Amino acid sequence: MSTPDAPALESPLSIGGVRLPNRLYRAPLLECAGNGAGAVDELIADLEPAAASGAGLICQGATIVREAGGCAAPGMTRVHDPDFVAELGRLTDAVHRHGGRIAIQLEHGGLRSMETWHREYRHQHPNLQQLAVSEPPWQLRALERTGFVSYDAHVLSTAEAHELATDFGRAAARAVDAGYDVIHLAGANMGLLHQFCSPFYNRREDEFGDLGRFFEVVLDAIRTHAGDVPVITKLPAETEAPPFVRRRRSRRETVRLAERLATAGYDGLVPVNGSVFWDMSVIRGEFPDAAWRDERHRDGYTAAFGSPLRAAAVAVANWIESFQFDFEPAWNADLCRRVRDRVDVPVLLEGGVRDRSQIDTLLGDACDAVGMGRPFYAEPRLPARLLDADDAAVVCENCNNCAVPQAGGAAGVCRSADVLERAGRLRKAGAYERDQPDASGVEDADTETVDSRPAGET
C-alpha cells in the first residue's frame, strides 16, 4: 500500500521547472525510425498515442549525437543534422497538443556500437573505429578471439572527450529549438556515458579518470549551448556483472555519484541496475524462443552475427542468460529508493513495473515518477488504462520476443499473438479511450511552480 502522504499518479511533477501533468512516463525504447524521408512520421506514429492517452512525459529513445558511428542497434536516429532535427518539431507539436511533455535521449554507443558486433555493418564500414574511454578490458579482448566481436578502438584524448561533450551540447540545443522539453542522457546500458563512469571501462589518468567528470562536462556543454533546459540522466550500478569482473560500480558508488550530479545541477536521475556487458540484465524475463525461431528474422540475424551457426550460438547464450535474469518486478526499486533518500531532485524509476497497484506503492517511497517501456509495444495507449483504473495491469508477458529481432533491424513491436489478442479485446471495449486535456496553457506551464516532492517530504 502507498504511504498516506505519497503523491498520486495523477498529480503533477516539476522537473527543472517544466511541469509534467502526471507522474507516468513512457520510458525510452528503440523506435528504429532512422533518418529517412518517413522517419518523423514514424516517430509520430510511435510516440503520439502515449501522449494522446495521458502520459505526462514521453521519452524518445536513444538518438546519436554524431553523423558517423555510435549506433548501438540498426535503425537508430541521429540528431547531428539541424534540418532533420528541425523537422522533429512536428513530433513535439503533436505531443504538446495533447498536453504532454517530451524528452529526447542523447547517446553514443562507444564500444557497444554496431561497428563492434554487427558483422554486415563492420564489412560496410571497414574504416569506422569505435570511440573508447580506454583500451578495451581483457575480458572484451578475450571475447574478441571468439570472432563474435571485433575491436579497432580509438581512445579519446582529453581534447576529443571535451569535443564529444560539446557535441552532446549542440545536439541538445537543436532539440530545444525543435520543441523538446527535457534532455535525457543515456548514461547506462553500456553506452559511452556509462563507460566513462565505469571502473571496468575507465582506466584513464587525465581529468576523465574521475568517474563522474564526463557527466559534469556534458552538463556544462548543454548549459552553454541549450540554456536552462531540464537535464536528466540514467545512472548505472553494475550489480549484475559476472563474478570474474572485479572492477565494477557498486550501489554505494552509484548513490554517491547521484549526490554529486544532483549538486552539479542535474534536474532528475534514473538509477538502474545492470552489468558491464550488453546482456539480459537490461530487459529480463523469458527466453524469446519464438523470436529466434521465426524465419522472417533469420536473414537479419545472419547479417548481424555473420552466419546461421553464429546466430544459433548467440541464441544459446541468450537462453542461458534467461535463467540468470528472470523477470523481477520493479527490479530497480531498491537502488532508486537509496538514491531518493540522498538527493533533492526527482528520481524516476523504470524496469519491471507492470500494474497500477505497484505504481501506487512505489510513488513517494522509491521514486517520484514511474516509467514503462516494452508494455507500450503491445499497448501504445496504455496510460489511458493505468490512469483510469486502480486495478489496471499491462498485457505484456515479458517474453522478450519484441526485443531480439531489433538486433537484425526489425521494428520494436509486440509479436505475441495472445498478448495482442488481449489488447485487441481491451481496445474494442473502449479501455484506451480518454478525454483529451485542455492543452491551451501548455507553453505557460514552463514557469509554473510545482513541487518535485509532495508536501512534507524532504
Image (spheres, helix red, strand yellow):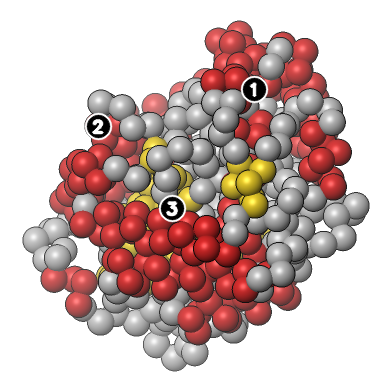
Residue 286 point in image, percent of width and height? 70, 34
Amino acid under disc 3: Leu
Disc 3 element: strand
Residue 34 horizontal/vertical position (percent): 38, 32
Q: Earlier in the sequence, mark 2 or mark 3?
A: 2
Distance (Cα) linking label 2 and label 3: 20 Å
Name, please, the residue furthest toward the right.
Answer: 244
Residue sitting at x 58%, y 81%: 259
Which one is earlier in the sequence, the residue at label 3 or at label 1? 3
Residue 151 disc label: none
- Nearest the viewer among 198 and 155 is 155
Q: Which residue is mark 3?
A: 106
Kindly state the secondary structure of the residue where label 1 is placed.
helix
Does residue 302 appear in this view?
A: yes
- Left or right: 180 with respect to 145? left
The residue at the point 37 percent across, 67 percent down is 222
Which element is circle 2 on?
A: helix
Q: Amino acid at mark 1?
A: Arg
Q: Would you name the residue on which mark 1 appears?
A: 119
Answer whether labels 1 and 2 touch (C-beta < 8 Å): no
Instruction: Residue 90 in the image: state x and y as whole percent.
Output: 18, 43
Binning the other alpha carbons within 10 Å of mark 2 as few (below 14), some (14 to 19) or many (20 upward) gives some
**Which residue is at the front of the view, 268 or 6?**
268
Query: Is 412 on the left-hand or right-hand side of 403?
Result: left
Res 378 seen here: no
**Image quadrant of residue 171?**
bottom left
